[in-house]
Image (cartoon, rainbow, N blue to C red):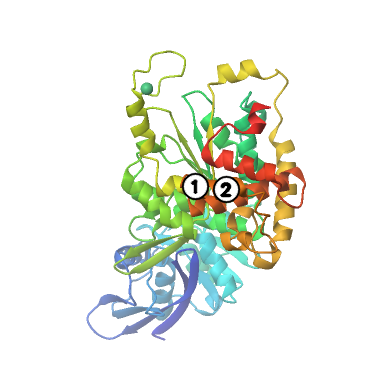
Amino acid sequence: MSYARVLCVGLAGVAGHLVEVEADLSAGLPALALTGLPDTALNEARDRVRAAVVNSGRDWPNRRITVNLLPAALPKHGSAFDLAIAAAVLAGAGELPPAPLDRVVLLGELGLDGTVRPVRGVLPMVAAAVRAGITRVIVPAGNAREATVVPGVTVRAVDTLHRLVEFARGEAALLDPPDAPETTEPPGPDLADVAGQEIGRYALEIAAAGGHHLALFGPPGSGKTMLAERLPSILPELDDDAALEVTALQSIAGVLPPDGRLIRRPPFQAPHHSSSLAALVGGGSGLIRPGALSLAHRGVLFLDEVPEMSRGTLQALRQPLESGRVVLSRARGTTEYPARAQLVVAANPCPCASPAGDHACQCTPLVRRRYLGKLSGPLLDRIDMKIHLLPVRAAQLTVATEPAEPSTAVAVRVARARTAAAARWATGGWRVNAEVPGHRLRRPPWRLPPRDTAVLHDALEIGVLSARGFDRCLRLAWTIADLDGRDRPAVGDVCEAYQLRMGEPTTRAAA
Ligand SMILES: [Zn+2]
């Protein structure tokens, strides 16, 4: 027999598709040709596969070999095809009986010595195989744990190409994946650690309950980062679909923890302000890596010292934040990753970043205005709440010294508010208030009486509030009412929403 076919999976974004790897061996000058739109990393498979086969103690067939990847029209990236290519060639040459590999997906990169190396994106690849009706996969030993996260599939692992050949010949067994780790995710930072900052904590609770974007302003040491880091701790755990999606993105990025457990806590990403555009939105060659924006999908993207970020970087964030997805274009086609993240931005009041009250800051009002002015415009318009934090010292003086409420207590209120919102918007399929289109809030039956929204109409009239800002205030007002356990916002909620939006001290903070 001089023809064989085995199965593999190609990834396009987080979506995968079944790829048939066929090998044909014919008489002619010894050569290996790869067809079916392979990228550079895949083209190098030619040399890796040959060396791996020879170093596994097998003869490389001295014939003209054509390896074709089907369907040809779909782009294929990365090195996960190596194992399938080697198996197809060896099966075509009669070195490996093909029957045991029938309807089995093979994934893995080959080292020159014949070892099978872990690859990125195994989880979404296995998920795609299952969707295509495949129930058995063979993956690199280093990826076996993460592959078992996908329900409905039997996972076996290989460490060497030699073992795969022996298995097909019935001379050796494949490896079992390691057992599920006993441990659960270590607890993240807790709100109990945040002293004072009543208004900051309150804004964080609203942000969590309604999925709203938040901006925190304050001098260094006022707790901006502390608060932002604790937002995931009051968000609900990810449901099965979201958990699989988030874990798949980490798998593609190659940042999945080695125990490969399903990620249940909403992710938190805090890229540095000097991060490259590729680090932020995604990029690279081969299997394109998702950026921080996609790794924060279903979680929190925290941008500290945001006025220090370049204008181009901030511009690049706008579209994905609006659409909830990142589209990366390459010569060989486009890759799309989900990016529905909740944004928290933080900024110092001035570029010198000296702690308030030290009188060390020499920045003039113009310099300060210019600094924060970099933030203004389209990005700031998309942020629902702007909160000014006091230095902790001053804040602590003004609050009682009772222990701060832990995250678990806040999370209960957040979950209750989210349940109320999800039930209300069930017909539209929106989960949180931030997702509801503005026109739905401005029309019956959800329109609020004009006398209750007068403050917003007045602000719109004199131009201090944009049309987008108007809708964002309405969404905030609904969240405030949800947290309070009322079924409709009252005039007080609208006013508070307006104050949070405009960065004014709220009535609640003064109380
Ligand atoms: Zn200054």
* Residue at image coords 70%, 55%: 421
**428, above or below 306, in the image:** below
The amino acid marked with disc number 1 is Leu
| Residue in the foreground of this view, choosing between 87 and 274 | 274
The crowd level at tag 1 (other Cα within 10 Å; few <14, some 14-19, many 20+) is many
The image shows residue 143, relative to residue 22, as above or below, that is above
**Where residue 366 appears, x then y in whole percent?**
33, 28
Residue 189 vs residue 342, the one in the foreground: 342
Marks 2/1 in contact by CB < 8 Å: the verdict is yes
- Residue 236, image x, y percentages: 67, 48
Please, what secondary structure does the residue beneath circle 1 have? loop
Residue 240, percent across and down? Answer: 66, 58
Q: Which residue corresponds to the image point at 34% horizontal and 83% vertical from the top-left?
A: 25
* Residue type pointed to by label 2: Leu
Which residue corresponds to the image point at 54% horizontal and 47% vertical from the top-left? 458
Secondary structure beneath dot 2 equals helix
Mark 2 nearby-residue class (10 Å; few <14, some 14–19, many ≥20): many
Q: Which residue is mark 1?
A: 465
> Does residue 73 lie above or below 464 as drawn?
below
Name the residue tied to disc 2. Answer: 456
- Position of residue 49 in the picture relative to residue 181 (left or right): left
Q: Quadrant of the C terminus?
A: top right
From the viewer's perspective, is 416 left or right of 112?
A: right
Q: Which mark is residue 55?
A: none
Q: Is residue 236 visible?
A: no
Q: Quadrant of ligand 1?
A: top left
Residue farthest toward the left in the current orientation of the protein = 29
Tell me if I can see residue 358 in this picture. yes
How far across and how far down the image is residue 407, in percent? 69, 35
Question: In the image shown, does 382 or 201 lie closer to the viewer?
Answer: 382
